[in-house]
Each structure stands twice: as structure tokens, then as C-alpha cells.
Image (cartoon, rainbow, N blue to C red):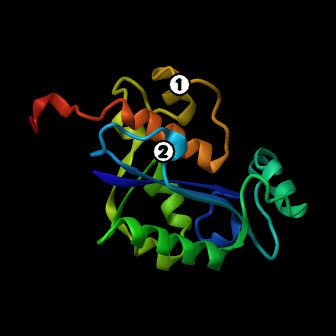
Amino acid sequence: MKYIALDLETTCIDPKKPQNIIMASLVFEDTSLNPLPGLEDLPYLTCFVEQEEYCGSPFALSMNAWILEAIAKRNEKKYPILKLDEFTQKSVEFIDYYFDKKAVLAGKNVMGFDFQFLPEALQNKFAYRAIDTGSVFIDWNRIYPPSSSDLKKMLNLEGEVSHDAYEDNLDTIRALRTTYGRSPAGLFD
């Protein structure tokens, strides 16, 4: 299966405000490759997103202050700075390069959060079925699906959740790679 891990960093949790995307990352994975490439060798598109102005919740602004500082100082050492329409166009080209039809999305709460913020032109490039790591690794004894931090602990993945969209995508792929080659209860064997 081919999929794209998607993660966004935003200044709020209101998807009606796509202008509040401040960082975006898409990472392509093809599970049929043998051997799988190293995570650092996977094709990706990652950028900071420049907006006319930024507003949002104090929590999100504080958590993502490092991104806002990079944009304000025009620091493109780590990732390029693109306007939302440039990011959208480059993302469409990236997806079209790897997929003949609609792409499969993967991520933590990707359809419930990230997908909702995407401009319509980009939403139209993705299938409506997605891989949510919270559902893949669900613990039925809990009230809610696991958070990204819970997943890292459950799967013994090093480090904390970075809130760097690219790094968080690599965590998604690390988590999902633990399931490759296995199907639920032998249903597809």
C-alpha cells in the first residue's frame, strides 16, 4: 500500500480557519518496497506556511512559537517558507507524482483534524478512507483512543512528541511500520 503521512501545525483548532496553518508536512511511504528505505530517505514535502497575520489560542501559539519565530526571522535553514497557495500547488504536484488516483492519508487524528484544515483543492486529492494511528493501536479499555504521546510510549518510540510536522509524520510511519505484514486476526491471510 502507498500512503501519505500528513501533519499540520496550526494556531487554533478551528478548521474553518485554514489561514491558521503555520507548518505542513507530507511524507510518502510505499509498504511494498523490500527493504523499506530509511525514514530519512522517504520523499517528503515540508514547509512553514506564511500567512498575512496569525491569531489563535494561547496554548497553540505558545506550543508553536518556534515555528512563528522561524517565519518572522525568515529562517529557511530547516524548512522553506511558502504561502498557503504555494504549499497547496506543490502538494498537489507531490501527490500526483506518486498516485494515479486519490492518495491514502495516514496520521494521528488525520481526518478529524488535519484534513479539515486543508484547502478544498488539496482535500480533493485524498481518498475518504484514511489510516489513523490512534485507531490502529486502540486500547478498548480506555475512554479515548491513544494520543501521540501514548503511542510513542506504547511502541517504545524514543523522544517526546515534537510538534514539528515532519518529525511527527516520521513517528506515524515508525508506528505503522510495526504492523506491516500483519493483518487483524488473520482475516486477509
Front-most of residues 16 and 18: 18
Examine the rendered structure and indicate whether residue 74 appears above or below residue 19.
Answer: above
**Mark 1, secondary structure of its residue:** loop
| Residue 63 image position (x, y, % from top left) | 76, 45
Question: Whole-Å distance between the Cαs marked 2 and 1?
Answer: 15 Å
In the picture provided, is 147 more to the left or to the right than 159? left
Q: What percent of the width, then of the height, locates residue 144? A: 45, 34
* Residue 17 visible in the picture: no
In the drawing, what numbered circle is on residue 186? none
Res 121 visible: yes
Instruction: Give the amino acid at mark 1.
Output: Leu
Q: Residue furthest right?
A: 73
Asked if 111 appears above or below 148 in the picture, the reply is below
Q: Secondary structure at mark 2?
A: loop
For the residues labelled 2 and 1, say whether their Cβ atoms are less than 8 Å apart. Answer: no
N-terminal-most mark, 2 or 1: 2
Quarter holding the C terminus is top left
- The tag on residue 108 is 2
Q: Position of residue 176 (x, y in %)?
A: 38, 37
Which residue is more in the foreground, 31 or 67? 31
Residue neighbourhood size for the residue with mark 2, other residues' Cα within 10 Å, grouped as few (<14), some (14–19), many (≥20): many
Residue named by callout 1: 157
- Name the spot of residue 185 as percent of width and height, x first: 15, 28
Amino acid type for the residue under numbered disc 2? Lys
Q: Given this view, does label 2 or label 1 mark the residue nearer the observer?
A: 1
